[in-house]
Image (spheres, helix red, strand yellow):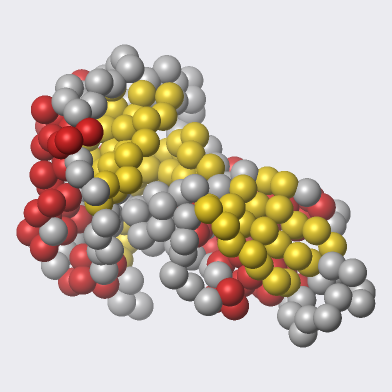
Amino acid sequence: MTIFPCAKVNLGLNVVSRRPDGYHNLETVFYPIPLYDALEVHRMDANFPTEVNCDLKVTGMEIDSREADNLVVRAYQLLAKDFELPRVHTHLFKQIPSQAGLGGGSSDAAFMIRLLDEHFHINMGNPMMEEYAARLGADCAFFITAEPAFAQGIGNELEPVSAEDFSLAGMYMVLVKPDVAVSTREAYSKIVPRKPQKSCRDIVLQPVETWREELINDFEESIFAIHPEIGEIKENLYKNGAIYAQMTGSGSCVFALFHGVPSINEDDFPDCYQNVLQL
């Protein structure tokens, strides 16, 4: 059985307060985009010679993690503690760049939960799957439904955003990711939490043309100071005609929105991953 985990972008990201547990409360709008990994699971033969209950083969883009640490395997192990699951072979084909702020690993984990639930007839329902997903990462729960949502808390408190009120359907999105790894811990260390005057939930309901002046990612100031090449990508996307451009998550990918098919000067983004998506 095969399933296709999607990526997401953050439309605005505000760090509003520091929590007693050392984490931070956020406000952001998660928006799913049509960039997908592929995840396939097959029941393992009883005589297959391995000591693990879930083995993992990764193809496509390389990822820097041990098999046992991959969130796909951890999702299997999490469910196997509470439900009777057979041993499985898992194949993950990666197309979502890692360390980009696109949620690829979190999506893979959540979709693994969805796949196991459907394939082996666990019948948990979305609320229970979201509870399990949240144990694996702050934004994992979003990918259980993968529908636009306003997120609070550490990213795990979700409120649906109605497609009737807000949709980017028909627009084009350009993704540009430099070969830069951003330390999330370092990004948070430079943040001064503050409540925005206007919530990103309200701003995204406005015309996209108004977002440039109001919809911000609080991480950009500190990350651009450490990695100015990311800030240069954002400015070059505006020079190429973007209506709105922003770093997603804590980086390092920058996305830009266009009303029509974008005409991008690839020389402005040397040595970068680039992709154009129609939403």
- What is the residue that sits farthest to the bottom in this orientation? 51
The residue drawn where x is 82% and y is 71% is 87
Q: Which sits in the foreground, 202 or 233?
A: 233
Left or right of residue 198, residue 171 in this image:
right
Q: Is residue 162 above or below residue 37?
A: above
The residue drawn where x is 17% and y is 22% is 241
The residue drawn where x is 14% and y is 67% is 190
Query: Dividing the picture into quarters, in which one does residue 251 lie?
Result: bottom left
Q: Which sits in the foreground, 15 or 20?
A: 15
Where residue 266 sits: x, y (%)? 22, 33
Where residue 35 sits: x, y (%)? 48, 39
Give the position of the C terminus as an image quadrant.
top left
Query: Dividing the picture into quarters, in which one does residue 219 lie?
Result: bottom left
Where residue 174 sits: x, y (%)? 31, 32
The residue drawn where x is 11% and y is 28% is 239
Left or right of residue 93, residue 45 in this image:
right
Q: Is residue 235 visible?
A: yes
Left or right of residue 57, residue 209 in this image:
left
Q: Is residue 244 visible?
A: no
Q: Which sits in the foreground, 263 or 124?
A: 263
